[in-house]
Image (cartoon, rainbow, N blue to C red):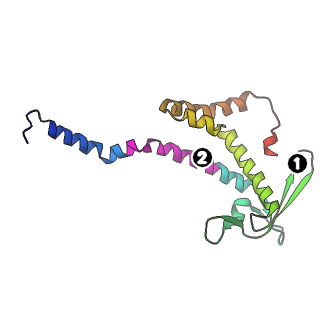
Amino acid sequence: MFDPAGDENSMSSIRAFANSWFMNAVNRDYTFALYGIGEYLIHNTTMEACLNHIKLTDPDTGKKISFWDAIEPKEGGNALQFKKNYIYEVKSVDGSVTTYNLSKDFNDPETKKFINWTRSRIRYACQSLHGALNNEDKGLIYKYFLGKAIMNFRQWMVGSFSTKFRWPYFDADIM
């Protein structure tokens, strides 16, 4: 009731600031939201480029179509499937050709093998462009603000130096 020092008014303004939208955003760690959005954008763009690069053959017409254009959501919308059956030929370094007869359903064993091969190609492209970092290290280092800032540079520096100064090499991960 009696507040000679004026503490009550100052405390109410502090409480109002503490409950403001700005403090809620900072306290809930939305500060790195743009960083996360950027990471997803970079990796999803790389994935889309890889899927557009892989060309499947329509067995009925012989026409080539990109993997990206050949998929559609399943009924219910929670999974993907091919629009129809397709063929894909992989040419190895030694000149041999592996043919995948892809069924509409992704649960077919041969189609699963092809999807896993495609997934490894996408993962390799993302790691080549943006750096490789396993989840254990990521969790420990990204725990701190300074770690997040430093690791931002690590992701592109290693790949950049590798492409400029490394001798040509064969990577078995993409086979």
Amino acid identity at mark 2: Ile
43 drawn magenta: yes
Q: Is 70 displayed left or right of 33 in the figure?
A: right
Give the quarter of the image for residue 66. bottom right
Residue 129 rendering spot, x and y as whole percentages: 67, 40
Residue 84 rendering spot, x and y as whole percentages: 76, 70
- State whether residue 86 is above or below residue 139: below
Residue 95 rendering spot, x and y as whole percentages: 92, 48
Q: Residues within 10 Å of mark 1 (few under 14, many from 20)?
A: few
For the N terminus, the image quarter is: top left
The residue furthest front is 1
Q: Residue at x 72, y 51 (%)?
A: 119
Amino acid identity at mark 1: Ser
Disc 1 to disc 2, how far (Cα)?
29 Å
The numbered disc on residue 158 is: none
Q: Which residue is mark 2?
A: 42
28 drawn magenta: yes
Bounds of the magenta span? 25-45
Q: Residue at x 25, y 43 (%)?
A: 15
Q: Is 56 displayed left or right of 148 in the figure?
A: right
Q: Which residue is mark 1?
A: 92
Give the quarter of the image for residue 5. top left
Q: Residue at x 71, y 66 (%)?
A: 81
Q: Is 81 displayed left or right of 89 in the figure?
A: left
